[in-house]
Image: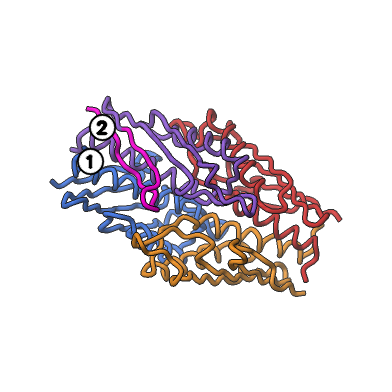
Chain colours: A blue, B purple, C red, D orange
Amino acid sequence: MATDAQQACFEAGIKFGALYHQFAGTPVSPASAPSLETAIEESIRNQPFCEGVAVDIKTERLDVEHGYTELTGEYMDVELRIDYEGTTVAAEMAMDDGYPLMRLAEIDP
Amino acid sequence: MATDAQQACFEAGIKFGALYHQFAGTPVSPASAPSLETAIEESIRNQPFCEGVAVDIKTERLDVEHGYTELTGEYMDVELRIDYEGTTVAAEMAMDDGYPLMRLAEIDP
Amino acid sequence: MATDAQQACFEAGIKFGALYHQFAGTPVSPASAPSLETAIEESIRNQPFCEGVAVDIKTERLDVEHGYTELTGEYMDVELRIDYEGTTVAAEMAMDDGYPLMRLAEIDP
Amino acid sequence: MATDAQQACFEAGIKFGALYHQFAGTPVSPASAPSLETAIEESIRNQPFCEGVAVDIKTERLDVEHGYTELTGEYMDVELRIDYEGTTVAAEMAMDDGYPLMRLAEIDP
């Protein structure tokens, strides 16, 4: 009943919600950020229809007063790509006015 | 660029991914299931465009050999409703062949 | 090999780590805070040797610019009580100089 | 008031609870298990008094019928070491009769 593009958008949303709420709260420091980026990318990539995930933890923004902090949307940018039966969706998460905004960037076709 | 229906599907996906990965792993018993259902519903309901969430923890399926178990998709059915600029989406999560399948149930219009 | 008091302290730590990292990131608003407090208390109470958990979400501190925020240690105080073979431990979590400090409050005997 | 050994046991418990409830539910496959092991080790290592963490995801136990599964205690063994003011604690998590048992292995002195 849903179109392939609607399904692809649904799947993109699932990946963002999963990624964010699975990893929010993880202790992270500039030194441990690279391994966390890789683990997030590879774990979410396991999910159905997910063709690519790129996570960029903004280590320069991390509060290191106590040596580490907890991961929140404030500290990461994410791009992901879904392929659902030939329809591809690119979606992004980035800070927008103090809120980690998830948005659809491209739907094809 | 995305249609309202595609946006609504994206938002539905975000809520499912968030709900699942935020609460998977929570210790749950038949006695504590009702308060967990309510908390999941009310927390996800906070998110943008979310008009309704219904969580049903299948207490009869909980393994109570150790008194409690950890919440997984195996133990809950979820229904949610999104309203994005007048387009509504109903989506469901339920077990399907051993896998907690999230699916779009209705998109209107 | 460990004493009962050491075991009780270990169990208190497990509960704090579990509580914090299970629920950090949960969407929360002043309206949904009470159900989340109850769900956290009842879920952690399921764990072995846990005799009591009290969670106080500081709703007056919640950033409600976007209608809700995500739960972090900044927004909650927690008290819990462990009974391990007759040795009781009381432990607390509260903000201390910008850090959600978990500490042992009383060990008896 | 607490002894250094009790404090060290408390800290060991915090790390186990944090590790388990932060990462339970993460999508994992045999291919992505190594990066997840590393990320878990490095993230928990950030926490105070933590001197070492070793995570072994039992890839041979992963259910790969759907290509991946969600991490639970069933699939990982963990060892960690705490140093609190010169008192060291070694602790372990492993499956015990169907339950992921966390236990104190050594306290010195």
User: Whole-percent x and y of residue D73?
Assistant: 54, 62
Q: What residue sits right under mark 2 in the picture?
A: B107
Q: Do the residues at pointers 1 and 2 share their chain? A: no
Mark 1, chain letter? A
| Residue at left offset 71%, top offset 49% | C50
The magenta-colored residue range is B90-109
Which residue sits at x=62%, y=40%?
B31
Q: Amino acid at mark 1?
A: Gln
Query: Which quadrant: the N terminus of chain C?
Result: bottom right
Helix, strand or loop for the magenta stretch, by majority: strand
Q: Is residue A71 left or right of residue C8?
A: left
- Report which quarter residue B108 is drawn in: top left
Residue C88 rendering spot, x and y as whole percentages: 80, 52
Q: Nearer the viewer, residue A25 or D100?
A: D100
Q: Residue at x 60, y 61 (%)?
A: D99
- Eyeballing the image, is B107 above or below C85? above
Q: Name above or below for residue B95 compared with residue B8.
A: below
- For disc 1, the marked residue is A6
* SS state under label 2: strand
Residue B13 visible in the shown view: yes
Q: Secondary structure at mark 1?
A: helix
